[in-house]
Image (spheres, helix red, strand yellow):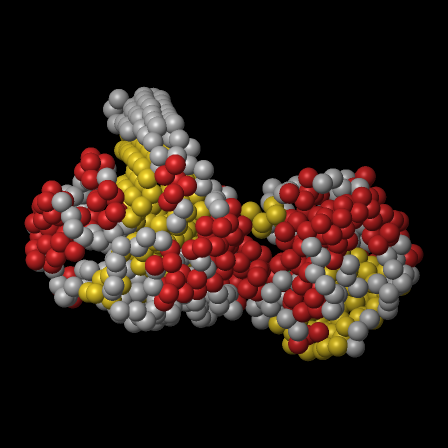
Amino acid sequence: MTTETQSIETLATQEYKYGFITQIETETAPRGLNEDIIRLISFKKNEPKWLLEWRLKAYRYWLTMEEPKWHNVHYPKINYQDIIYYAAPKHKNKLNSLDDIDPEIRRTYEKLGIPLEEQMRIAGVAVDAVFDSVSVATTFKEKLKNLGIIFCSFSEAVQEYPELVKKYLGSVVPYTDNYFATLNSAVFTDGSFCYVPKGVRCPMELSTYFRINTADTGQFERTLIVAEEGSYVSYLEGCTAPIRDTNQLHAAVVELVAFDNAQIKYSTVQNWYPGDKEGKGGIYNFVTKRGKCAGVSSKISWTQVETGSAITWKYPSCILQGDNSIGEFYSVAVANNRQQADTGTKMVHIGKNTRSTIVSKGISAGFGNNSYRGLVQVHKKAENTRNFSQCDSLLIGDKCGAHTFPYIEVKNTSSTVEHEASTSKIGEDQIFYCKQRGLSTEDAVNMIVNGFCKEVFRELPMEFAVEAQKLLGISLEGSVG
Amino acid sequence: MLEIKNLHASINGKNILKGINLTVKPGEVHAIMGPNGSGKSTLAQVIAGRETYEVTEGEVLFNGKNILEMDPEERAREGVFVAFQYPVEIPGVSNTYFLKAGLNEIRKHRGLEPLDAVEFLALVRERLKVLHLTENLLNRSVNEGFSGGEKKRNEIFQMAVLEPTLSILDETDSGLDIDALRDVADGVNKLRKKDNATIVVTHYQRLLNYIVPDYVHVLQDGKIVKSGGRELALELEEKGYDWVKEQAA
Ligand SMILES: Nc1ncnc2c1ncn2[C@@H]1O[C@H](COP(=O)(O)OP(=O)(O)OP(=O)(O)O)[C@@H](O)[C@H]1O
Ligand SMILES: [Mg+2]
């Protein structure tokens, strides 16, 4: 088998196609973090007093915390005083229609493949675009409004629906939760807000597109989705960033709340700039995502395709509080070149008959390092709960790594927890077989990798599945030579 | 069509092929027989371009072109096809998707327009019929969870769709039940054209009752030690390989 490893040499020459920089004037806060900066952010956003207080509480708490070290990722110490915590495109008067958006910004989104008007016309996807820290446009709002669905930027929600924000902000991820979430609570600038009223099925995919543009800015967005009894919503988040040779921090928080019989489907295609071949630059993606199945028979599904970032650190989790509630986690994570991914999920079974499914597909290539970290926790009174976990790793070349850290804590004897894991290598024989049928090496690898990820891709909404497949192809380009 | 001259090949420094000479003309069927480990599969893989084998001497011309300099996919696009003795599984990749991608690469190479989904399906259905295969083959992942016999049939199905000019069937008959053997042989015969050639590697003369060869070669220890007509296979079955060895000595 040694010859196989040798012949699959890692060349790892990937190009990041979203690496352009948009020339627009931005309004930025001075570098560094202190209470004044937080007051500035809050002031700029015209926030109510309670929110400023909440931010400050978080900040003071953060000062007492230490950066976590338990993960399997390595990076130089982040200087939190060297980051710009607020950057907004200038002349941001109130946007009344899409025509008011800065043409430069619109062009950026077009380059990214999400023309806003187009999205309107095609009907089906409503986009909330977040550019650096400020949400620039929310399409489709009117149509949704008629159904009673609120879908807007977080800042707008603070202005228009302060009661809802106050009620749910921090209800799933408290400001004391973890180092990065606490930092986010102190300095978050924008994000998306979505509220689906009782019994309403959201008729289209809601989508947010995040993009980091300004150099040295951190992006700290905050997303909150609340699905009332019997409602349904499917939400997609996509991310890109320009090529820069310094690292940028991205520490987001996403909170989901699902009441009785409600269902939230949250899909992510994360394609932040991963850094170059030597590991220079790239996004540090430290994200806290958590959903609470608060009501009976509620369901939260996380689907993520993580192809970008220099470091990915995220564990979208479900708190299964309501009886019969369901949590799902489907993940594809790629670590190519010098990328590091430490990702997984937490399924906390509290209610009776709760069920969870975990399907994790880790792909490592080049010198990439991929870790799955998952916790399945069954509380004492969580009778008849079931969990099934499957963690598969695919290695391309022999300089990359795959690690699995499954933690299982079961305090109820009537529960079933199953864990399956596998590690495989793209075989030289598989590639040869494809080539013998006329396919190029590149296409062969693509096909094999996509086949490996199939169970996850089929959870994505159709058009995003296609997008995800393409992205995967791009991020693995040249990984087999 | 195929001209192999003094071909030597090794793997991990071990010589396996030790001077193969073989000429195959359009329309012909050649059978290659020989004991286990004599190098039959190695020969097939070297012709197809497997990089794990090192060609140390000799040449292989395909339609006048030196194919040893080509990548495996280029050889495939030129019309070389191998039905593998041990077809590999590609989990999660549908048979249809896989074949369509391959066929369209081959068509592109030949200057033909790619087939769209509808045209492809029509072609595939027709070929399934020729081989007496059912459509459920299409939706399954490439060889994943296939029985030994199903894998062999899938190889022939791929051959039928890709329409190669030279097909090398490496022990396609082993693992097939009697009916399947007849179906496969029948299919191979129906797909025969006067400008195509086939090399069948087999241990059993039974297959040759269905696919009647023009020539039979005996491969032993990396060399063709005896060649003859159809009757050689019968003789081999009766007398075994030791007989050839004695003769050659
Ligand atoms: N990777 C390898 N390393 C060392 N020797 C190998 C390797 N692969 C094949 N061989 C050897 O090469 C020789 C020829 O193998 P090959 O598969 O070509 O035989 P075959 O004639 O097809 O046999 P069979 O009838 O069993 O299919 C065998 O002795 C085999 O052990
Ligand atoms: Mg063999």
- Answer yes or no: is residue B159 visible: yes
The correct choice, above or below, for B240 with respect to A318 in the image is below
Of residues A119 and A17, the one drawn nearer to the viewer in this rendering? A119
Of residues A39 and A9, the one drawn nearer to the viewer in this rendering? A39
Q: Horizontally, is A233 left or right of B106 in the view?
A: left
Q: Horizontally, is A341 left or right of A431 in the view?
A: left
Where is residue A56 shown, x and y percent of the image? Answer: 9, 49
Q: Quadrant of residue A206?
A: top left
Where is residue B123 shown, x and y percent of the image? Answer: 76, 51
The correct choice, above or below, for B6 with respect to B175 in the image is below
The correct choice, above or below, for B184 with respect to A398 in the image is above
Number of numbered tags placed on the structure image: 0
Where is residue A307 shown, x and y percent of the image? Answer: 40, 57
Where is residue A295 shown, x and y percent of the image? Answer: 31, 26
Of residues B51 and B153, the one drawn nearer to the viewer in this rendering? B153
The correct choice, above or below, for B215 with respect to A193 in the image is below
- Answer yes or no: is residue A346 visible: no
Q: Horizontally, is B116 left or right of B216 in the view?
A: left
- The residue at the point 79 percent across, 57 percent down is B200
- The residue at the point 64 percent across, 43 percent down is B139
- The residue at the point 66 percent across, 59 percent down is B102
- The residue at the point 84 percent across, 65 percent down is B226
Of residues A63 and B138, the one drawn nearer to the viewer in this rendering? A63
Q: In which quarter of the image is residue A85?
A: bottom left
